[in-house]
Image (cartoon, rainbow, N blue to C red):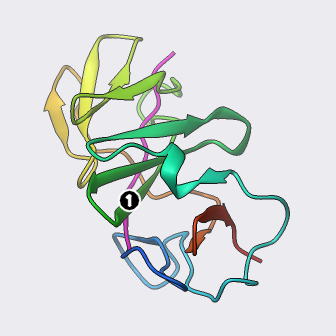
Amino acid sequence: MCADGSTGTGAAGLAAALTARGGPDDGASGGGENAGAGPALAATSDTPEGGGKVFAARKVVVTQPAAGEFEAFAATRTHQGCAVRSVADGVIDCPCRNSTFSIADGSVRSGPAPKPLPPPTVRITVGGDSIQPAG
């Protein structure tokens, strides 16, 4: 199934946070190295530049459009409730109807999806080499 996710912008570093695009309650949060709640989702080094990872259990997609820049999107599209499957070559792939989304801002790169990926429902922080849910 396809999933729409939304973006978050952050910078690599000791206490960089992914902040979803949108309003103040958009699903991402800042915080220090110990701001996470629960075990790390992945190491930042496991999220390739120009690619990303889908964390299906957390319903979030984390991407790295450029070195040290991380974005977060919901992994479930709002249009049909489909879940995104993979991230490669600068796009997030939705297998439902073969839509693709930009890893930089979640915008539709190829349709038929009518809307960009929404913000993540899980807050994510990047601290050191760790990507984890925020508290």
Q: Amino acid at mark 1?
A: Glu
Examine the rendered structure and indicate whether residue 7 appears above or below residue 61: below
What residue is shown with label 1? 71
Examine the rendered structure and indicate whether residue 14 appears above or below residue 7: below
Q: Position of residue 72 (x, y in %)?
A: 45, 56
Q: Position of residue 129 (x, y in %)?
A: 58, 65
The foreground one among 99 and 64 is 64
Q: Which residues are magenta?
A: 1-10
Q: Quadrant of residue 7?
A: bottom left
The foreground one among 5 and 40 is 40
Q: Quadrant of residue 32?
A: bottom right
For label 1, the SS is strand
Q: Is residue 36 magenta?
A: no
> Residue, x 19% and y 37% (percent of image)?
108
Q: Is residue 4 magenta?
A: yes
Main SS, magenta region, reads loop
> Residue, x 51% and y 15% (percent of image)?
1
- Taking 105 as reference, is 7 left or right? right
> Residue, x 34% and y 23% (percent of image)?
93
Q: Quadrant of residue 50?
A: top left
Q: Position of residue 77 (x, y in %)?
A: 45, 35
- Taking 43 as reference, is 133 left or right? right
> Residue, x 38% and y 21% (percent of image)?
94
- Taking 99 as reference, is 4 left or right? right
The foreground one among 12 and 133 is 12
Quadrant including the C terminus: bottom right
Number of numbered discs present? 1
Examine the rendered structure and indicate whether residue 16 appears above or below residue 130: below
Q: Position of residue 29 (x, y in %)?
A: 57, 80
- Residue found farthest to the right: 38
